[in-house]
Amino acid sequence: MKQLKLTEARQARFLEALADTGSVTAAVAEARTSRTRVYELRKTDTAFAAAWDEAQEIATDRLEREARRRTMEGVTKPLVRGGKLVRDDDGKPIMVQHYSDSVLLALLKARRPPRGERSVRIQLPALRSTHDAASAIAMLTAAAAAGEVTPGEATELSSLVEVFIKALRAAEFDHQVEEVAGSDDWFTEC
């Protein structure tokens, strides 16, 4: 197949085919261009790159709709027992609806990931002092009690606050050492 220049019309055909199929290979064949040309254009043309991303989103939405349909409505398949097609009294294959629990679980997980895999949104006070850190720990405890975060999530976030406290104490210690070392009295006492 001769590879033709990637005109605006071919770009549009490529993007439409990409949205339909989700396949760059199929889209370049439909647009009668090459993978190299479209990838080069993607690197240099931000509008084309954005349209490409949108086409892929459309293709993914279509896949999700089809997966959802197959999961909820099922797929009609012939009944097979012992490797043989089962037929009714008229000799026609018996058809049964098949549903996919694994696809249903995958769709559910994509929409609502398990608590440990989702991002936790909790507004903690700005940490500038040990008082702020104590307030943050109190807020985390309250959030865990209210079910806004799991106890494990609260523990992980508390450990970050504890690291802050240790860093704050180390900085205070360094400051005290600098003050003592800078004092003339320190030399006379030694």
Image (cartoon, rainbow, N blue to C red):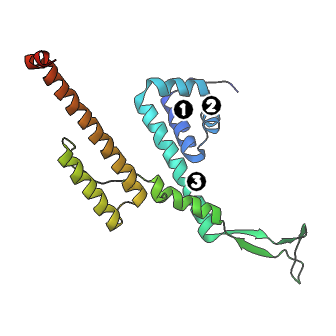
- CB contact under 8 Å: marks 3 and 2: no
- Check the image and report above or below for 145 versus 53: below
Neighbours of disc 1 within 10 Å: few (<14), some (14-19), many (20+): some
Task: Provide the residue designation for mark 1.
Answer: 10
Q: Amino acid at mark 2?
A: Arg
Q: Is the C-beta separation of discs 2 and 1 under 8 Å? A: yes
Q: Please tell me which of labels 3 and 2 falls first in the chain.
A: 2
N-terminal of the pair, mark 2 or mark 1, is: 1
Mark 3 or 2, which is nearer the eye?
3
Would you call the spot at circle 3 few (<14 residues within 10 Å), some (14-19), or many (20 or more)? Answer: some
**Quadrant position of the N terminus in the picture:** top right
Q: Position of residue 34 (x, y in %)?
A: 62, 27
Q: CA distance from mark 2 to mark 1?
A: 7 Å
In the image shown, does 75 or 38 lie closer to the viewer? 75
Amino acid type indicated by mark 1: Arg
Q: Nearer the viewer, residue 100 or 67?
A: 100
Q: Earlier in the sequence, mark 3 or mark 1?
A: 1
Q: Tell me the number on the disc at residue 63.
A: 3
Secondary structure at numbered mark 3? helix
Q: Which residue is mark 2?
A: 32
Residue 33 lies, with reference to residue 105, above or below; the image says above
Extreme residue in the bottom direction: 89
Q: For the point 55% across and 54% down, which residue is it?
A: 62
Which one is closest to the eye, mark 3 or mark 1?
Answer: 3
